Amino acid sequence: MSTTTVQAGNAEIYSPLKVLKHPDFRILATGETPAPTANIAAFYNPAHEIHLVEKPKPKPGPGQVLLHVRATGICGSDVHFWQHGRIGDSMVVTDECGSGHESAGEVVEVGEGVTQWKVGDRVAIEAGVPCSQPSCDACRTGRYNACPDVVFFSTPPFHGTLTRWHLHPAQWLHRLPDNVSFEEGSLCEPLAVALAGIERAGLRLGDPVLICGAGPIGLVSLLSARAGGAEPIVITDLFQNRLDFAKQLVPGVRTVLIKRGSTPKEQAEEIKAAAGGALKLAMECTGVESSVHTAVHSMQFGGKVFIIGVGKNEQVFPFMHLSANEIDVSFQYRYANQYPKAIRLVAGGLIDVKPLVTHRFKLEDAVSAFHVAADPAQGAIKVQIQD
Ligand SMILES: NC(=O)c1ccc[n+]([C@@H]2O[C@H](COP(=O)([O-])OP(=O)(O)OC[C@H]3O[C@@H](n4cnc5c(N)ncnc54)[C@H](O)[C@@H]3O)[C@@H](O)[C@H]2O)c1
Ligand SMILES: OC[C@H](O)C(O)[C@@H](O)CO
Ligand SMILES: [Zn+2]
Ligand SMILES: [Zn+2]
């Protein structure tokens, strides 16, 4: 009989992390050099500050694994929580909160009953840990991204994985093959977002696809659409340097620069001209209302606009055009069951996420890393923190 099942609910498993407050952690003084093994982390707070803190090194309880986090990517949502203090109405920074949810690491200690992991194993860390209780419909039916009790690291009130020593339930880790680096393992998180979208959008071989936005999510969607056999693929952005990056990543992609002041219908005409006709599917990776409209007007009859981007709480949409053209609109909320697939695609060489990393920092320099990630002039795509 397996004893690895964690009996406690998520609140019990994570309450020590969730309620970790002063004086359980200490904000480092500016210029202070932490000890090389200190459990430092980058925290944001409601005053829009970002700083290093030192927290205790946790001990794994039953069913838990202690990890040395070796690579973490900074996500746009980390920057958003820092600078704007909220995403929508439900995710609000009300206290000090640890950043980071795109991580991979190494097992350094296992708790009681953990049989599937041993010290030295290399893993991608699933960023959202659902409750896994049989009474939870979302968990029981496999759509665990809908779990109301999910602990999503770095979304308040849960501290993030951008730290040195991180505690995680054994079941929510994914083994990295030898040919997948920690850096690639951490990139499996944004890749999981794109793969969830591609799967639910029903992309098929030879589909003409539009990708709106050439940020990290648009770019992993581009890599995924290419691996899935989309042709042609058109990608848009407001910035030529982002389109140039996309073209380097996938040379066959067709790029359309979105000019501020042009209308969605005008933009759609340019997109259709680049594709040689209307497209079947749009992966919308900006969340910007005008970009959604552009996507809608670029679709053929029966097409689909699949929205991964998040944006304003209320947006209007071209109701009658959608209706008269049977264009579906769908959305994605995080992901479920995507990490194993992401790792297989990277290990098998079908998706190469390595070029996305433009900047690397040491954990001690995490605050500088955030400043680079947040400054468009730096031209960063994915900023990584490694330890
Ligand atoms: N649904 C989810 O679960 C999920 C998960 C992760 C990220 N996201 C969201 O996905 C979106 C993309 O994430 P990212 O990290 O790539 O963000 P990002 O801000 O780095 O990239 C967005 C890109 O869109 C471009 N853009 C803005 N307005 C545009 C327009 N009108 N037309 C074309 N391009 C335009 C920007 O220039 C930028 O390059 C964000 O809204 C993010 O919050 C959603
Ligand atoms: O990669 C996952 C996303 O960043 C999260 O959904 C975040 O935006 C809110 O928790
Ligand atoms: Zn993210
Ligand atoms: Zn659940």
Image (spheres, rainbow, N blue to C red):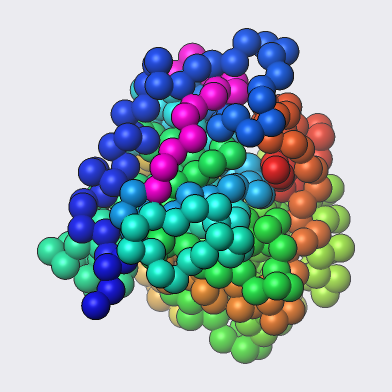
Between 3 and 301, the one nearer to me in the picture: 3
The image shows residue 24 at horizontal and vertical percentages of 40, 21
In which quadrant of the rendered image does the C terminus lie? top right
Residue 85 drawn above or below residue 257: above
Residue 104 drawn above or below residue 53: below
Residue 5 drawn above or below residue 231: above
The image shows residue 285 at horizontal and vertical percentages of 58, 55
Q: Indicate left or right for 41 with 243 as reference.
A: left
Q: Is residue 259 magenta?
A: no
Picture mark count:
0
Identify the magenta region. 46-60
Residue at 67%, 84% (x, y): give it: 229
Q: Is residue 53 magenta?
A: yes
Residue 96 sits in which quadrant?
top left
The image shows residue 280 at horizontal and vertical percentages of 57, 78
In which quadrant of the rendered image does the N terminus lie? bottom left
Q: Main secondary structure of the magenta part?
A: loop
Residue at 62%, 10% (x, y): give it: 29
Residue 274 drawn above or below residue 158: below
Q: Is residue 209 visible?
A: no
Q: Is residue 157 visible?
A: yes
Residue 140 sits in which quadrant?
bottom left
Q: Residue furthest bottom?
A: 205
Q: Residue furthest left?
A: 135
Q: Indicate left or right for 277 with 26 as reference.
A: right
Residue 172 sits in which quadrant?
bottom left
Residue at 70%, 56% (x, y): give it: 183
Residue at 68%, 58% (x, y): give it: 182
The image shows residue 348 at horizontal and vertical percentages of 69, 81
